[in-house]
Amino acid sequence: MIKKEKINFILEELNSLYPKTPIPLAHQNKFELLIAVLLSAQCTDERVNQISPILFKVANNPFDMEKISKEKIYDIIKPCGLGPQKSKAISELSKILVNKFYDYEDKYYSEEQGRNEENDTESETPQSTP
């Protein structure tokens, strides 16, 4: 069996054993999942699922999140631990998503970055525009 065949065999076996792996982090869109994963470092999924809804009531998309101060984010996510680093990361990540991957003229994520309105299967269009 060559390397490629071994890889395909392993992938097929894993897919048959675990056809759909549940995601334990509560989320409504890909941005929320991304932030929940960031919060989960050195924190239990249970705690993240208690804290993230509070954060997502304030901002559940990068456009709203980038407008929130790091201090306010920190105040909300502090129970997850590593608050200063995580609040800075959430704020900077939101700015990067908006500034590098959003096309303001066409109001969608640029195709060069791998996403546009046509291939987006979930309702992920930003809820507020800058």
Image (cartoon, rainbow, N blue to C red):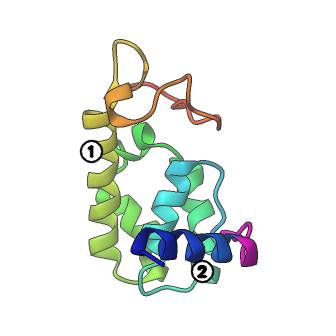
- Would you name the residue on which mark 2 appears? 45
Give percent across and percent down for residue 43.
49, 85
Farthest top residue in view: 105
Image point (35%, 42%), residue name: 67
Image point (40%, 75%), residue name: 3
Mark 2 surroundings: few (<14), some (14-19) or many (≥20) residues within 10 A? some
Image point (40%, 61%), residue name: 73
Magenta stretch contains residue 19: yes
Cα distance between the residues tagged 1 and 2: 25 Å
- Numbered mark located on residue 96 in the image: 1
Question: In the image, what residue type sits under mark 1?
Answer: Ile
Give percent across and percent down for residue 62.
42, 43
Give percent across and percent down for residue 20.
73, 66
**In the image, which residues are magenta?**
16-24
Prevalent SS, magenta region: loop
Image point (47%, 58%), residue name: 34
Side of 59 relative to 65 (left or right): right
Question: In the image, what residue type sits under mark 2?
Answer: Asp
Q: Quadrant of residue 103?
A: top left
- Numbered mark located on residue 118 in the image: none
Give percent across and percent down for residue 106.
40, 13
Mark 1 surroundings: few (<14), some (14-19) or many (≥20) residues within 10 A? some
**Label 1: element kind:** helix
Q: Quadrant of the C terminus?
A: top left
**Label 2: element kind:** helix
Residue 24 appears in the rendering? no
